[in-house]
Amino acid sequence: MNTFMAKKNNIKRDWYIVDAQDKILGRMLTTVSRVLQGKHKPEYTPHVDVGDFVIITNATKVKLTGKKMKEKIHYYVTHYQGGLRKRMVGKTLATAPEKVFRRSVKRMLPRTRLGKDMLKKLKIYAGSDHPHQAQLPKELVIRN
């Protein structure tokens, strides 16, 4: 009996859409990262990108639990001398929610070339409009 291995050219990719309004950020993104990796499919193979595309809308209306909006800090480096900067997550979420989502999902994916390819299948939009109606995305059910 042979073990099944998915082939790159035989993969069927679906499109899913998630409405982030009133959803908890971390709980929602764990489900999204599993779909991007393809772990929800029976033909999941660790060394092949079998994941699906995910569209996230209403990114500015996501919820964070506890005091994270006011107390959680994201650090980044400008690559200049003394260029360590910090910013509150609530402020980043209000101005550029795509950065918060992409950073969180990126840390849930493998840290390889495969993970970078998986991250390219994530589409994030601050409002409810998106240009992917032609792909006929299905609703991804996420429980809070």
Image: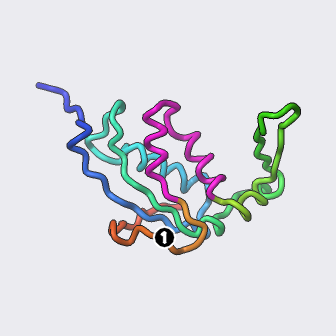
Q: Which residues are magenta?
A: 98-123
Vertical placement of residue 74 versus 68, above or below: above
**Dominant secondary structure, magenta:** helix
- Which is nearer the eye, 3 or 86? 86
Q: Which residue is mark 1?
A: 130
Q: In the rendered image, which quarter is residue 108 located in?
A: top right
- Which is nearer the eye, 45 or 125? 125
- Which is nearer the eye, 67 or 4? 4
Q: Is residue 57 left or right of residue 80?
A: left
The location of residue 100, given as percent across then percent down, is: 66, 53
At 38% from the left and 72% from the top, the residue drawn is 133
At 69% from the left and 60% from the top, the residue drawn is 96
Furthest toward the right, the residue is: 82
Residue 2 is inside the magenta segment: no
Q: Is residue 15 left or right of residue 119?
A: left
* Secondary structure category for the residue under label 1: loop
At 43% from the left and 63% from the top, the residue drawn is 141
At 41% from the left and 67% from the top, the residue drawn is 132
Vertical placement of residue 117 versus 22, above or below: above
